[in-house]
Image: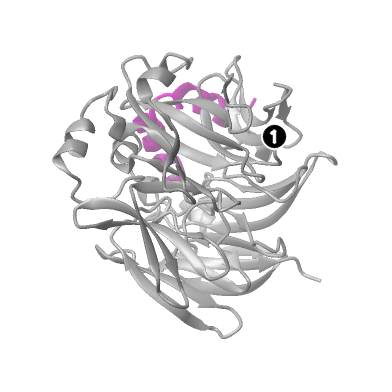
Amino acid sequence: MSLEKKIYDLVKSNKKLKNKLKFIYQLALLPVALCKKKIKTDYDIVAEIPGYFGFHDRPSLRNNNLLFHENIENDSVDICVYSLTEEKVIFRTMTNCFNNQQGSMLTWFDDESIIYNDFSNGNPVTKIRNILSAEVRIIEGHFFSLSDSRTKVTLINFKRFGVGLPGYGYNVNYSDEINTDSKIMKSKSNSSDLIVYDLLTGEYLKRFDIISLSNLASNLLTDGYYYFSHSKFSPDSSKLFFLLRTSDDKINKSQLFVYDFEAYTLKVIKTGGMVSHLSWLDNESIISYSNDENKRDGYYVYNVNSAIITLLDYDNLMNVDGHPSNISSHEFITDTYANKYRRQILYKANMEKKSIEIILDVFSPFKFSNEKRVDLHPRMSTCNHYITIDTSYSGKPVQLVLTKRK
């Protein structure tokens, strides 16, 4: 084990100390970092669009139309649809909800519609808007994930999410009820529940509360701040994973749950209390950067049917946290945070061949650090031919569209 890794393992449980040491180390190596080319890739860059998309668990590119946020420094942020074919913005609207990590949760609903979070008349809302007719459907509450069947969404409390994990909430004027609840470490209010909402009937299919699930969880912080985050439906929409998290000034702890809508069962996935980023590989397997019960960090595959847990450890890059997105049941793309030279790496992992392919190596300027960082958040296009990422290499957030060079 390298000296750097030993030091990291010693300080990783203290967020403030970890970030301070990382800043000093990166600053000392900045002269070396600036000598390198800002972006290196053997892939073709099909487009570079000023703006920012958001998270890694949903495609931004569909039928040659690209989603992104613009004017992100303003209170009201523009949501745009850019046509790669016409090389222009073909739709624009605004939202009052945006953060630097996940945007407005902007998502393609179908070929003609988008879904995103907004704030209207003093209330958190989800909007499903047709980009051709501008017709809009409004749902009470903020959504996190949409099922591929387009029949279900999850709703969570983004006020608690932002308190528990700074940089993930929205800067809006919530009601007194939500603001009061956000100050309670372990909420009993149903406003803090994770809800599964049926888009066909307009009814709640399922709701999970903090108190009940905390009794099932392990390795959480007893005196920590509790909140829900990071949900995603399986490709066939029959299952849902989500996290119950706790945090304090130094560390976050997470419990991964999987709910089966057909069997009506809730499974508690065993880890060592660290679950960072994750994605479905297929209808029964989850790829996650997390740790095991022996506290070993890495990429793990969890089979939710067989309960088999597999560690992927065939490359040093796989010992570093990132944002995985599946290509198939045996391949995924993921990234790294800025390393000591402020470089972010995008790579593809093949689990059958036990190999990785580096796709891109890019510089991230110092001003994009901590809560203001711009993660690559790699995602596949809906046709699986393109990769889109967010990057700050040029000194401002841009979205790149990449494809393998022929």
Give the residue number, with chain letter if any, for mark 1. Answer: 285
Can residue 198 be seen from the camera position used here?
yes
Vertically, is 343 above or below 23?
A: below
Q: Quadrant of the C terminus?
A: bottom right
Q: Is residue 23 magenta?
A: yes
**Image-based side of 366 in relation to 335, left or right:** left
Please count the marks in the image: 1
Q: Is residue 369 magenta?
A: no
| Residue at far bottom of view | 86
Residue 107 lies, in percent from the top left, at 49, 58
**Image-based side of 141 in relation to 291, left or right:** left
The residue positioned 55% from the left and 53% from the top of the image is 150
**Secondary structure character of the magenta stretch overall:** helix
Q: Amino acid at mark 1?
A: Ser
Instruction: Report the magenta residues as a range.
Output: 1-27
Residue 122 lies, in percent from the top left, at 19, 53
Vertically, is 185 above or below 36?
A: above
Residue 22 lies, in percent from the top left, at 43, 38
The residue positioned 39% from the left and 37% from the top of the image is 19
183 vs 234, nearest the viewer = 234
The residue positioned 57% from the left and 42% from the top of the image is 233
Count residues near mark 1 (Cα–Cα under 10 Å), then give few for <14, some for 14-19, many for 20+. many
